Amino acid sequence: MNTAPLQGIKVIDFTEVQSGPSCTQLLAWLGADVIKIERPGVGDATRKELQFDPNLPSYYFLQLNSDKKSLTLDAKTPDGKAILTKLIQSADIFIENLHPGAMDKLGFSWDVVHKLNPKCIYGTIKGFPVSSKYADLKAYEPIAQVTAAAASTTGWYEGDYNVPTQSGAALGDSNTGMHLTIGILAALVQREKTGEGCYVYQSMHNACLNLCRIKTRDQLTLDKIGYLTQFPQYPDGKFGDCVPRSGNIEGGGVLGWTYKCKPAGDMDSEIDANNYVYIILQRGAKDFELFCQATGFTDWLTNPDFNTADARDRNKQAIYKRIGEWTADKTKFEVTDILGKAGVPVGPVLSTKEMMSDESLYDGNTLVRINQGGEIGEFVTVGVPFTMSNFQPTYGPAPTLGGNTEEVLKAYGYTPDQIAEFAKNGTTAPVEAPAAPKA
Ligand SMILES: CC(C)(COP(=O)(O)OP(=O)(O)OC[C@H]1O[C@@H](n2cnc3c(N)ncnc32)[C@H](O)[C@@H]1OP(=O)(O)O)[C@@H](O)C(=O)NCCC(=O)NCCS
């Protein structure tokens, strides 16, 4: 049994860049029939962003648009509007992420789409919640990170590098797409009961904020007592009015930190500076004992400066120093081995290269190889991030710009003559510039 959960679900994908396409990418891999609308001659902006070859689509585009169909359509022409209307009338889901107000201007707002097809679910991504004073702003990834308190709480907390810092993870982009997917799937289940599609509004701000909830927890605590015991600033440093940057603390009540190791060679060099390991000291006495036995720090078991979790919070700088000395002559893999076997939470800091070279991750979902064919051949991407006991996704190539235009229009009942006319009048292909007059 390998039934795709979204088999038979038709999605009209009016999204581009990363946030929207990451949502429709997941829907496609779960079996939905995704038709991606792209501007004739232009297409999704990412096709030509960060290319490895000026004549080929970028990995950015390929990684977000596999298994979709590409229909080039100018939704500003009368024919384009008529075609889009027809597509919407038989769609289960319509998703867009244009700048605020653009869809209304094109004539395909939620109200319009809901009248055209009451069963259709309408997903939309914008930078900010409707109530926000920034609701009309255009937004990209860092805008979401800086306004949702992700950047102000990330990075180093002292010295020259004490600046708000972006996470390498796409908290504003792919994370927003994943959040919208949750909303869309909830709307599909809801439609089973009501028979009616609903409007799912997902802001990048909300998606990012949802991952920053522990920072709001810390703000509440700081407001009450004026300090945060898990932070490196405690007990000797100063706290201001808001949650500060915290370097590499774990974030919860346990004592976590990154420790420098000896480079392991191969892909772990001084140049890349990823020769670090993350170690966590849990709060429980039994867990702490496991750590002390594994490292030989058994004197800590009877020392009142270290043998309780509260004492360790107060003396974390001494702990960082001693553990750092212990890890310095070992590689991150050796430390992981020693502490992992002892039952201590530990993990090596891995580079993209090290992670992508781990064959055990090519398990059908975690990392996947897609054969795009042609000059591109095989490329690697991140697959469906969960596994289902009765469904294994398959991963196919991304479409060429407008590669499915004829096929899609035919399937919607357009005749070859009509299809040829749409290409000529600028609806599905760029209008050819008139030939320059002869000198
Ligand atoms: C990403 C963003 C900043 C880009 O803004 P932008 O450069 O103005 O690009 P957009 O794609 O939104 O729109 C450009 C124009 O193309 C038009 N357009 C896009 N696809 C079209 C199509 N198939 N047919 C006709 N017109 C189309 C839009 O209607 C818009 O026209 P307008 O300026 O006359 O209103 C903006 O879309 C945005 O803020 N989106 C919401 C948040 C988001 O998802 N951000 C991206 C995170 S990866």
Image (cartoon, grey):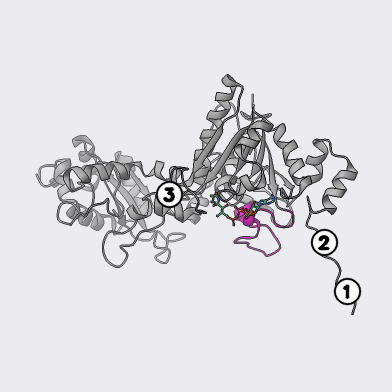
- The magenta segment: 40-61
Label 2's element? loop
Q: Is residue 132 left or right of residue 125?
A: left
Q: Quadrant of residue 43?
A: bottom right
Q: Is residue 420 left or right of residue 142?
A: right
Residue 312: image tag: none
- Residue type, numbered disc 1: Pro
Q: Is residue 332 left or right of residue 18?
A: left
Q: Which residue is mark 2?
A: 432
Q: Is residue 9 left or right of residue 282?
A: right
Q: Residues within 10 Å of mark 2 (few under 14, many from 20)?
A: few
- Residue type, numbered disc 3: Lys
Q: Which residue is mark 3?
A: 133
Q: Which residue is mark 1?
A: 437
Measured as percent of width and height from the top left, residue 199 is found at 56, 34
Label 1's element? loop
Residue at 69%, 56% (x, y): give it: 376
Residue 288 visible, this orientation: yes
Is 180 included in the stretch rendered in magenta?
A: no
Q: Depth check: 368 or 14 in front?
A: 14
